[in-house]
Image: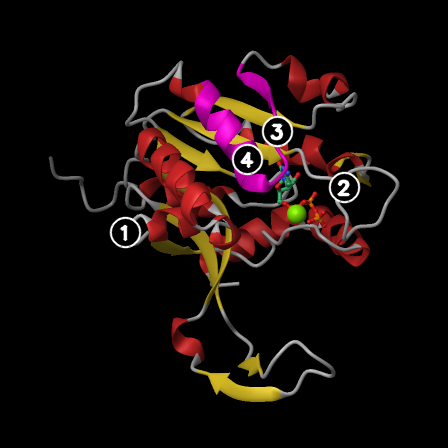
Amino acid sequence: MNTPANSPEPTPVATSYWAIVPAAGSGKRMGAGKPKQYLPLAGKPLIAHTLENILQWPGLAGVIVAIAADDSEFEHLAAAQDSRVHTVTGGAERADSVLAALDFLSERAAPETSVLVHDAARPMVSRKDIESLLAAGATALLAQPASDTIKQSRDKSGEPTVEQTLPRDRIWLAQTPQKAPLAVLLNALKTGLAQAPETITDEASALELAGYHPQLVPACRSNFKITHPADLILAEALLQHRQTLEKLQSGTDT
Ligand code: CTP
Ligand code: MG
């Protein structure tokens, strides 16, 4: 059907999908007295921002949060009361936590159900980037094209020195969410963890090992992962300017 030239394009309705949030890490690099997902950020725990953001994604069927076996904080979050939010016990590595959530979902959803895996430690993913990811191919991830010159060091011993400069035009920094059909991701992660566990650092790496070529969806750099203490200060500042950021991003590349 044609759309009249002066009418806005109809917003496509996202088909139903699930989100998985690995939140069972201990935050070693943050070095705080508790896991970083529960550290205060602009007046509430970091993970509260992430979950409130996710619960507004268009077409979301539900969220499965993988939490640590000894977690005593999750149940006190407002988002924990939302009927779309479920929890599972996470594992030793991030991939084990994601796998636990996929196992839970595979008993409740069809194998072709689309799944978006998103780190609890990324509270600032934008609505525009989520819409781009939902509109992308069946396997896809948010990623940022490298903007710095990329150096490869010689080896890990002693003071690092440059071996070479890598061509930047094909380098992307992987973010989350990362998207795949439920059964595809479950099989890829299980096989990847059995074959080469050290190489499985995100969902895409498992999919790559299984022969897939996930689509790289350009994303805003404000979707960084809160990892070190300074990241919390940066995130707090960015959250204060979120509306401005979202406006900027809807016009230009950031
Ligand atoms: N994660 C998880 N289960 C694990 C390890 C990590 O669910 N066994 C989650 C973290 O809670 C985080 C996301 O995976 O939301 C990304 O991991 P990362 O940033 O590495 O968090 P931590 O592992 O907690 O931090 P660190 O590596 O500094 O210890
Ligand atoms: Mg970690």
* Residue visible at 79% across and 50% down in the picture: 30
Q: Which of marks 3 and 2 is in front?
A: 3
Q: Which amino acid does label 3 sit on?
A: Gly
Q: In the drawing, does residue 202 fall left or right of residue 93?
A: left
> Residue type at mark 4?
Asp
Question: Is disc 3 in contact with disc 4, using a CB cutoff of under 8 Å?
Answer: yes
Residue 105 image point, x, y percent = 43, 20
Disc 4 vs disc 2: which is toward the camera?
4
SS at badge 3: loop
Q: In this view, does 231 lie above or below 154?
A: above
For disc 2, the neighbor class at 10 Å (few under 14, some 14 to 19, many from 20) is many
Which residue corresponds to mark 3? 90
Helix, strand or loop at mark 1: loop
Query: Label 2 is placed on what type of residue?
Result: Lys
Quote the CA–CA distance across marks 1 and 4: 21 Å
The residues bearing labels 4 and 2 have C-alpha atoms spaced at a distance of 19 Å
Task: Say above or below: 82 vs 211.
Answer: above
Range drawn in magenta: 84-104
Q: Earlier in the sequence, mark 1 or mark 4?
A: 4
Mark 2: C-beta under 8 Å from nearest atom of ligand 1: yes
Q: In the image, is the residue at mark 4 within 8 Å of ligand 1 by its beta carbon?
A: yes
Which residue bears the numbered disc 4? Answer: 96
Q: For mark 2, what is the residue?
A: 36
The disc, 3 or 2, on the residue closer to the chain's N-terminal end is 2
